[in-house]
Amino acid sequence: MAASRHPAPAPIFVLGGQVDVDVDIFAAHPGPEWTKIECATKRAYGCGDLAKEALQGLTLYAHLGGGDDPLFSSSSLAIRMTDTARRGFESELDLIHPRGDTRVACHHFICCPRKIAGDREGLTVVFLLFRRDPRAELAYYLAYDHAAASLCLLPHVPDPVEAVSSVKPVAKRNGAGGDFELFVMACELSSSSVPPRHFLCACTAETRANAASDGTGAWQMRNQSFQHEEVEESFSAHVVFPFKTMGIWAGLSRGLMYCDLDTTSDGDVGFGFIQLPYECLLDTMQEEMAEKVAYQPMEVTRTMGCVDSSITFVCIDPAREYANDLWEKVREARVCELWRLDGFTEAGLPEGSLECPIITANGALCVVLCDQSKFPEPYEGVLLDNICVFDVGLERLQWHGFAHDNRFTIPVISDSPLPFTQFPAEEATQ
């Protein structure tokens, strides 16, 4: 009798873009299927005393995909906080944005966490936003270092500036196995200069250990030197990542900005720009039409990442012409060709559109296969989407599985697993 074939383990991992938090019962245990993430240390840098104390009441949980089903690749993160921690963050918000009437209880204090960076560097960075109303917000980066099992709370860029292009930081390590570093592009909140001054904000082990008293705290601000006609003030970075010693801010409609992160200690930081292939360029109106009218963010059909010593750009909807000596066209394939690959029909996969592409470390292409017949009706629950991984040359279906899709957030797909498996799942508190 032929031995039964077991499906290969998932080569990619789908992490929900939003981090779960119970807005009504902040301290409630997320459930028995969740694994508590152990933290050897918890430290806050450049934060107020109330926020530093509140950090001790934060707990992270992971819901890992797979389990008994190797084809299931969805994972999730959750944050829970004690009532003391919740009051601490609320009080910190009140210090910065005082309420008009302190006798009125704060009934609309919410926490909006979003996973934004990490994994390949052994880091998970969450953008943590506390909000009482649209004019009273308090934002942090919550960074978990998997190697050191440490949790770090940092204010989201210094007070004199605001993040531009993206709130996502370039997250990297200082050398092999070194401490983590975050880099964010920012500009002055109010300035008499036109255009306003731009900065590269760097948070390193050195800046965290020697927090400045001038309002910049754990961040070092370096003047950003950049002169390129192709880039407007509204440049939006959809994808950010480290590449060798450089930081990459990739606008999937125009091109990528880059700088050498290892030369930011003295003088201005020089930025360069590489434009996308001409046929893939979108002007501001085309981008707004795609994102605001068609409700199709750039990440749905485009991505960029590093593979070995190259930066790779993937566009699911390429134009008809090609002319650019900075980019080499490696492969062009019609979606219908991928539908006819060996194993596609046998697996019962639908002939749907391709969305949310990512490039794995070995150059494979991972996409969500969208079945148009499965769009949810109003108030319908979570659906399952098919995930496909094609080889470098788009000539073979390497793997397929499925993941949750609630149609309201863009998933974060990674070829690195959440390294939380060493912790046993806790039982829910009765």
Image: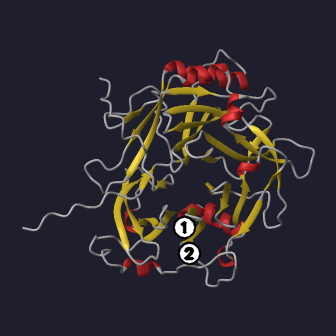
Most extreme residue toward the right, as rendered?
A: 192
Residue drawn at the location 19% of the way across and 64% of the way down:
5
CA separation in Å, label 1 and label 2: 7 Å
Q: How crowded is mark 2: few (under 14 residues within 10 Å), some or many (20 or more)?
A: few
- Position of 40 relative to 76 (above/below): above
Q: What residue type is labelled 1?
A: Thr
**Secondary structure of the residue carrying numbered label 2:** loop
Image position of 134 with respect to 327: above or below:
above
Residue drawn at (44%, 25%) of the image: 27
* Residue on which the image places disc 1: 301
The image position of residue 297, as x and y in percent, is 58, 61
From the image, which quarter does the N terminus lie in? bottom left
* Horizontal and vertical percent position of residue 265: 78, 43
Q: Residue at x 70, y 67 (%)?
A: 254
Q: Circle 2 is placed at which residue position?
A: 317
Is 131 left or right of 335, judged from the image as shown? right
Pinpoint residue 111: horizontal percent, then vertical percent. Answer: 56, 33
Q: In which quarter of the image is residue 222?
A: top right
Dot 1: what SS? Answer: loop
Q: Position of residue 145 (x, y in %)?
A: 53, 38
